[in-house]
């Protein structure tokens, strides 16, 4: 993983995932304090703190400033091509993996160094062609495609019955 300074496009940090991980989908939280990297080979979600290291008093700052990069969490999410959605509350992260029949929702505290709460949603069989299940997370609702039935479903994060929004004869590439 390469970290770049967006103002001058200079590389700040090079980071190798542990255990030969293969980066797939990469997202940031809305506040950009941490980066989410889905390791599709090992079925993990890495929560990486890519914050800037604190300045030393009395010492001229380095340009660009050094980055104190560390993996805060390694969370199991499932293998295969995946998708990530960060909730508009900046506290929830939804993950799908092509080789799983579930979605995994992580609810973080304000301090993201604390292990997040994990909730799983059963959503049916994986896509027959191995592609990732499309997902979105807005206003406490999960939007997803159900490949076996062709339904587009809305799942409430707080629990309760899924609502079918539409049924399509074939779910194409999304």
Image: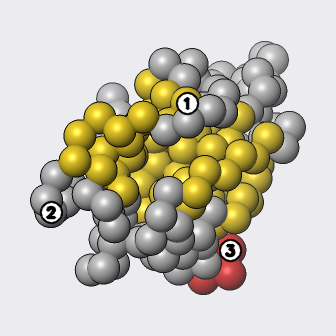
Asked whether 146 or 78 is in front, the reply is 146
Asked whether 151 or 108 is in front, the reply is 151
The reply to whether callout 1 and callout 3 are in contact (CB within 8 Å) is no
Spatial CA distance of label 3 from label 2 is 39 Å
Where does label 3 land, which residue? 18
Secondary element under disc 2, as helix, strand or loop, is loop
Q: Earlier in the sequence, mark 1 or mark 3?
A: 3
Quadrant for residue 53, please give it.
Answer: top right
Secondary element under disc 1, as helix, strand or loop, is strand
Give residue 90's position: percent from left, percent from top.
58, 23
Asked whether 166 or 1 is in front, the reply is 166
Where does label 1 land, which residue? 156
The reply to whether callout 2 and callout 1 are in contact (CB within 8 Å) is no
Spatial CA distance of label 2 from label 1 is 24 Å
Q: Nearer the viewer, mark 1 or mark 3?
A: 1
The reply to whether callout 3 and callout 2 are in contact (CB within 8 Å) is no
Image point 68% across, 42% down: which residue? Answer: 106
């Amino acid at each position: 993983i390469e970290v770049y300074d967006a103002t001058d496009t200079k590389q700040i940090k090079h980071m190798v995932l542990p255990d030969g991980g293969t980066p797939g989908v990469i997202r940031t939280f809305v506040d950009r304090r941490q980066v989410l990297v889905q390791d599709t080979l090992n079925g993990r979600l890495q929560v990486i703190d890519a914050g800037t290291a604190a300045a030393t008093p009395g010492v001229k700052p380095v340009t660009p400033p050094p980055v104190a990069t560390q993996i805060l969490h390694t969370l199991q999410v499932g293998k295969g091509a995946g998708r990530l959605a960060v909730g508009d509350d900046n506290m929830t992260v939804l993950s799908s993996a092509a080789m799983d029949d579930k979605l995994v929702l992580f609810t973080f505290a304000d301090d993201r160094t604390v292990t997040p709460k994990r909730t799983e949603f059963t959503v049916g069989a994986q896509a027959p062609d191995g592609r990732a299940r499309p997902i979105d997370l807005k206003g406490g609702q999960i939007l997803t495609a159900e490949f076996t039935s062709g339904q587009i479903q809305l799942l409430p994060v707080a629990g309760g019955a899924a609502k079918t929004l539409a049924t399509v004869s074939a779910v194409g590439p999304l």
